[in-house]
Image: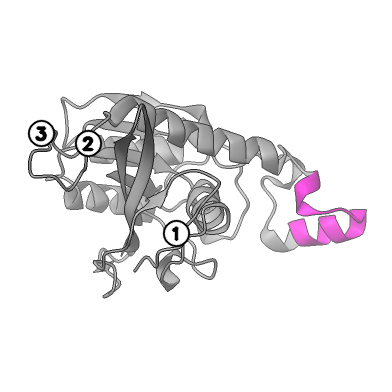
Amino acid sequence: MVHIVRHGETNSNLNHILQGHIDTKLNKVGREQADLVGRRLRKMKFDHIYSSDLSRAKKTAEAIAKHHPNIPFSVDMRLREKDIGRLSGLSIYEALDLIKNEGSQWEDYGESDEDFTDNVISFFDEIIDKHLPDTQDPESIEHPKKDTHILLVTHGGTINKFVREHMIHDLGFLVNDYLSIRHKARNTSVTKIVVRRVIIGSGSRCVSRRGSGIDTTSSSGGATTPSSEKSEASTIEIMRDVQRKPRLE
């Protein structure tokens, strides 16, 4: 299972400032959120923790990692938010005005959407190859391997790119409202994706059995969980030539 956590709140989040690669820090609420999500995940048996190198994500990851002192902790720049160039540090309204005045589009600033997508998907593919051993039928009672749990701590745009665009648009997943385009991952939300690798003939493939709803830790310390997030779904290949479209609840 891959657990994806968005970093805690920053003042830029609070003031609707675009951050991109700016290394903003968690504010007081963000630090409290990080501590809370750390406590919520303290009983998980993680095999590896990965974080963006930007402070807001890394500090959130460290708040979780302190409950797992013997678990490997790695930092990877591919988990960064998208670089938005000159739009970084502007409010959303200032950015919209700049784009309008220059007759440009969002995609004209910072790294290309293609490069951002390649970074996100290459990272996910890499950790699956590294941490998910080839197995026979994952439902078999003879399956000897324990479930692997990987934690990723990253940014809203990165989560949106993988879950909303790659899983929904590219792979054809149908999801509930909490994973839909209408809802973004909130600060310290937890998105869970169950992935299996199944041997097929001489090769293997990755399949995802369930993309659960997002558990969200609010800034007030509470947690909300969509009532439908536990539902099961059919398997789907984690590759671009999707053949089936299961509904994920």
Q: CA distance from mark 2 to mark 3?
A: 10 Å
Query: How packed is label 3: few (under 14 Cα within 10 Å), some, or many (20 or more)?
Result: few
Position of the C terminus by quadrant: bottom left
What is the magenta range? 95-108
In primary-sequence order, the first of circles 3 and 1 is: 3
Q: Is residue 52 visible?
A: no
In primary-sequence order, the first of circles 1 and 2 is: 2
Q: Nearer the viewer, residue 191 or 228?
A: 228
Amino acid type shown at disc 3: Pro
Q: Is residue 51 left or right of residue 228?
A: right
Q: Are marks 1 and 2 in contact (CB under 8 Å)?
A: no
Q: Is residue 174 visible?
A: yes
Q: Which residue is mark 2?
A: 136
Q: Which residue is mark 3?
A: 144
Q: Is residue 169 left or right of residue 57?
A: right
Q: Which residue is mark 1?
A: 185
Amino acid type shown at disc 2: Gln
**Residue 107 pos. (x, y %):** 76, 48
Q: CA distance from mark 3 to mark 1?
A: 34 Å
Amino acid type shown at disc 1: Ala
Query: How packed is label 2: few (under 14 Cα within 10 Å), some, or many (20 or more)?
Result: some
